[in-house]
Image: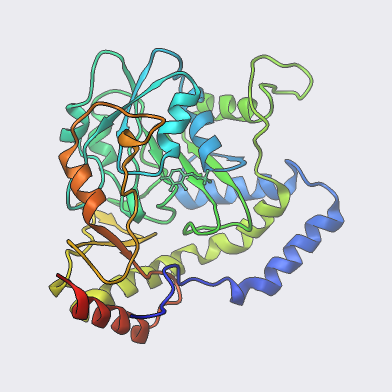
Amino acid sequence: MTDVPLFASSLDPYQDRLAEALERVARDGRYILGPEVEAFEAEFAAYLGVRHCVGVANGTDALTIALRALGIGPGDDVVMPSFTFYATAEATLAMGARPVFCDIDPDTLCVTAETVRAALSPRTKAIVPVHLFGNVAPVPELREFGLPVLEDSAQAAGADLAGRKAGALGEAATFSFYPSKNLPCLGDGGAITTDDDGVAERARILRFHGSQDKSTFIEVGYNSRLDEMQAAALRILLPELDGWSERRRSAAATYERLGLGEHARLPHATDGARHVYHLYVVRAERLPLGRGYYRVPVHRQPAIAADVELPATEEAARTNYALPMGTDLTEEQIRQVVEACASGST
Ligand SMILES: *Cc1c(COP(=O)(O)O)cnc(C)c1O
C-alpha cells in the first residue's frame, strides 16, 4: 500500500501572492462584480480564445444559466453522457428539460458522434458533452448535428483539441473552479464561455436576478456571481495553468514508462486532443488502490432512474480506478503506485 495522495497538488508556492491579492480586495471594498471579476473574465476569455467569459457562483450554476441562455426549457430534451458528475443532469432537470443519456467510447470515456446520434430525436434541443477526467470530447463532430453544443468543461481547463482549447469548441461552455479542479479557486466559482454575443448577454442578465441594469427585472433569474476574492485568486493562478497541465501530462507519461500498462488499461486521449488528467483514471477488474468514480452512473441515480441501456457506461463505472495525479507528483511516488498495482492486480 502507499500513502501517495489521490490529489497531489499544492498551492503552497502561491500562498504569499494569494494572500496579497485577497488583502487588496478586502481593502478595496468592492466585493461583488467589481474590477477583479471583470479582469479575470477578460483574461480567461483571452486564454481560451473566445469573445466572452461570464463568471458565476459555481460550475453547476454555470450549466443551469448556460442552458437557459441557449434557450433550453420545459419540454426540451438534452443529450448528455451518464458517466459524469450528477450536476450535468441536475442542471437540465432544474429547468424542466429532460436529460437523455447516451453512451461513451470505452477508451476515451467521452461521448462520440455515434453514441450521440443514437440518442437524438426531434425533441433534442442541445447536446452537452462532458470533457471527462481532462480528456476532450469530439465537439467539432458533434456540431455537425446542427444543434447547440454546450461543453461541460469543468474537468478540462487547459485541455485542447486540434489546437483549440476545451471551452472554445462549442456554442458555449461551462467551467468549475472548485478547489480540486485543474484551475482552482479558494472556494466555489464557475464560468460560462462563448463566442455568441447574445448568449453572453443573456447569461449576464440571468446571473443578476434577470436584470441588465440592476433595477429593472426582465425575467426570473439567479443570484449567481463569481465574487471578487475568488476572481483575484484565479488571476494569480490562471498563468500557472499551462505549466500545471504539462506536469500532469509528464506524470501520466511516467506512469506509462514505469510499466503501469502491464497491470491496467491506461487512459486514452481523443484523437487530436491534449489530455490534462484532471483525474488519472485507469481500468482494471480490481486494483488494490485508487478510487472508483461514478460507480452508480447518473441514469441509475434515484433522482433520475432513466430506463436506458448503456453498456460502455456500465463497464466503465464498474472497472475505473483513479490513481494519484497532480502537479506535484514525484517519480518516486509514481513508482510506489505502480508497484502497489503490480502486487495486487487481478
Ligand atoms: C465539478 C463538476 C461540475 C460542477 O461544478 P461545481 O462547481 O461543483 O458546481 C459539473 N460538471 C462536472 C463534469 C464536474 O466535474
Q: Quadrant of the N terminus?
A: bottom left
Q: Residue at x 38, y 16 (%)?
A: 76
Q: Answer with left or right where residue 26 lies relative to residue 266.
A: right
Compared to residue 99, the image places residue 7 above or below, namely below
Q: Residue at x 21, y 58 (%)?
A: 268
- Residue 205, image x and y in percent? 64, 25
Q: Quadrant of residue 53?
A: top right
Residue in front for this viewpoint, 97 or 294:
294
Q: Quadrant of the C terminus?
A: bottom left
Residue in front for this viewpoint, 322 or 63:
322
Q: Residue at x 44, y 53 (%)?
A: 157
Q: Answer with left or right where residue 79 lies relative to residue 96.
A: left
- Residue 153, image x and y in percent? 42, 45
- Residue 316, image x and y in percent? 22, 50
Q: Residue at x 49, y 71 (%)?
A: 9
Q: Quadrant of residue 34?
A: top right
